[in-house]
Amino acid sequence: MDLSGPWRVAPLDAALTRAGADPDLDDGDWHQLAVPGHWARDPAFADTNGPLLYRRRFDDDELTPLRDGERRWLVLEGVTAQSDVWLDGQYVGTTTAYFAIHRFDVTEILADTAAHAPDHVLCVEVSAPDQQTGRSKRSLTGSLQTGPLAPGPCPGGIWRPVRLATTGPVAIRHARTVCGSADESSAVLRHRVVLDAASDGEIQLHISVTGPDGEVAGGGTTRYEVAAGENRFEWHTDLAEPELWWPASLGDQPLYEVSLAVQVSDDTEAAASDRRSWRLGLREAKVTPSGWEINGRRLFVKGVALGPQHPFLAEVSDDDVRADLGAVAGAGLDLVRIHGHVAPPALYAEADRLGLLVWQDLPLVGGYATSTRGVARAVAREVVDLLGHHPSIAVWCAHDEPNDGAVPEPPKGPEDLPAITKSLGRHLLPSWNRSILDPLIRRELRAADPSRSVITRSGSLPMLTDLGGSDAHLWLGWHAGYHTDLADVLRQWPRLGGFLGGFGSQSVAIRDWGPDEPTWHGAETGAFERYLPRRAYADGESWAHATRAYQADLVRGHIETIRRLKYRPATGFCLMALADAGPEGGFGVLDHERRRKPAFDALVDACRPVVVIADAPPDITTTGAVLELDVHVVSDLAADLGPTKVTARSATDTWTWSQTWEGDLGADVCEFVGTFTVEVPEGHGPLTIDLELVAGDRVATNRYQTVIIPPAETLSPTSAT
């Protein structure tokens, strides 16, 4: 029975705390809200974080009568952020993980009420405490409420359907299936199920695996004895000669259907007591300091972070999912990072179909209180139960930026040491979040899913004993230094270049901003003040265009630099972010309505499968200066490029200079081509540097620009001013 639709809702006060679950309470004049939905959608509750009390009445005659041995379950598929549940005045239980499906046995409660009353009352007390600031947060809502991609409005509400479901005497409380291993000769599926039995007895667990061609690929039936209450079982299924799932750049995406049925009768024609099903792909994914490997093949990973796709998760449509993941694939990227949250189910199915890898964060962003230990462990198990079967998910990440800060730059001089030392302390000294909470979650994830790699914390320094335990969030050109510093920083501290997971800049919408810096939810006003102060521009529109041009330059420069370090030591990158969280602007290369910014085109150009790259020339130069620019070719193709010709040309309005190199280039490589040496000619104005690669039918181009200014000794005092 579907319990979606209008529910009665009221803010929880002292009186409702005492009497809110009473079935006889008159709620006829309460406000009505839609379920699924979020209360901030309604102006009456737009400014509250709860708690709110939801009530829903239904008649007993709406329920299908139970047959002998059947049980009734209350199923809440998603409540943000936490709730307590009552039915007919009796306490049922609590929900924590906002994305998890919670099931409660209500057979006896409904039967007791039906004996003396015609209707039932379901009450759910929901709260979503504010989590935007502080290091001692308690609700694990991640990017729904915290960090640069948080949409802003309170996400509280019953955002997924509520229903009553019927099972036989043995019900599935929790179940997961993951691909434990796979190669061209065989694959192993690992299953775990937690059953709730009404009484002692014997059951049969039947697994059936159907291949992409519709033929049965494997499975079997196993008998077990169960005791009344909770029973846990683990086993595996072997498959011969599987069709492997690949990222789109490496191959196809065949999917298998897996079904699990629990039977309490020897009659194979009898209805199952309960059942589950999954669609999965067979593949192996490993993430190590030396690189990402899919089915034993190395892949340089190009990715982008995706925050909550809508201020209200209940309103994310299938079209929204297809549009966003289509933009990721269309930009030539391999990876989408689900930043700090668990997305609606449709996103993962679409990633499976498109062949996109998924970096899946748990919903932890910033610091959390010690009281979250138990909830965090449960969240880790729930996320594997919910998503573990998806082949697109390549890695779990336990915690994003537990230090609440960027990785510090190497010091440029003695004056930098105090700030660097303080910043290093946040990354290296023991803390509750880094030293206790994060390793605890990592162990829970590895126990629940040993088939995948786990990133312990994102945005911390790589540790000597755990080189693959983190990725670097440098934020050069936004939180520290300048975006042109990346090559120098990695030259001094190469291990920070293993995987660049935090870079980008905010840009603002094209509009008249007035004389002040932006003040929208999530605006990083300090960074704007440092790099793009509003007062430096004549009008708001000019300033907005400047923020977008700056973002495009930063994106291009970072990606070209990290690709030039392919496998030495770089294994990939993940840009922040695909889309803005709100209409004012943000880190997105698309705005909140998914219109392209200049940074999106820069991203596409920098991520083409074959690129030719040079050192970036200085912004300005003078006549007689000698520019020495190293030229590299990067190919992510699985096949050799073969004979290749690279030409570099430098030109002004009246002058040109060129160099050419030829040779053979292999597959999946970054090769140094040569140094393009240019003596800057006389004159002033733009000097362009164009690169062209020709390999058979494949052509790749790139352009850089500097500006020639007169030497200082030729400037008069007036012109110098």
Image: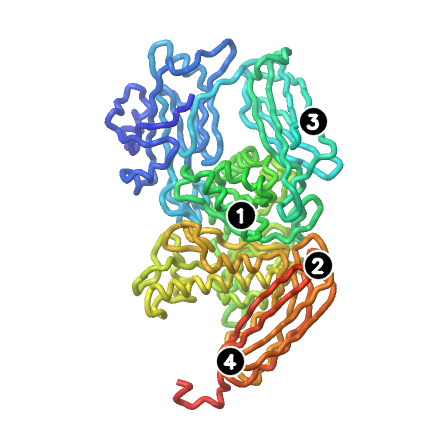
Q: CA distance from mark 4 to mark 3?
A: 70 Å
Residue at (58% x, 62% y) in the render: 560
Q: Is residue 163 above or below residue 386?
A: above
Q: Which residue is mark 1?
A: 337
* Mark 4: few/some/many CA within 10 Å (<14, 14-19, 20+): many
The answer to which of marks 1 and 4 sits earlier in the sequence is 1
Q: Is residue 65 above or below residue 383?
A: above
The answer to which of marks 4 and 2 sits earlier in the sequence is 2
Q: Which residue is mark 4?
A: 708
Q: Which residue is mark 3?
A: 218
* Mark 3: few/some/many CA within 10 Å (<14, 14-19, 20+): some
* Label 2 residue SS: loop
Q: Nearer the viewer, mark 4 or mark 2?
A: 2
Q: Amino acid at mark 4?
A: Ile
Q: Which residue is mark 2?
A: 641
Q: Is residue 390 visible?
A: yes
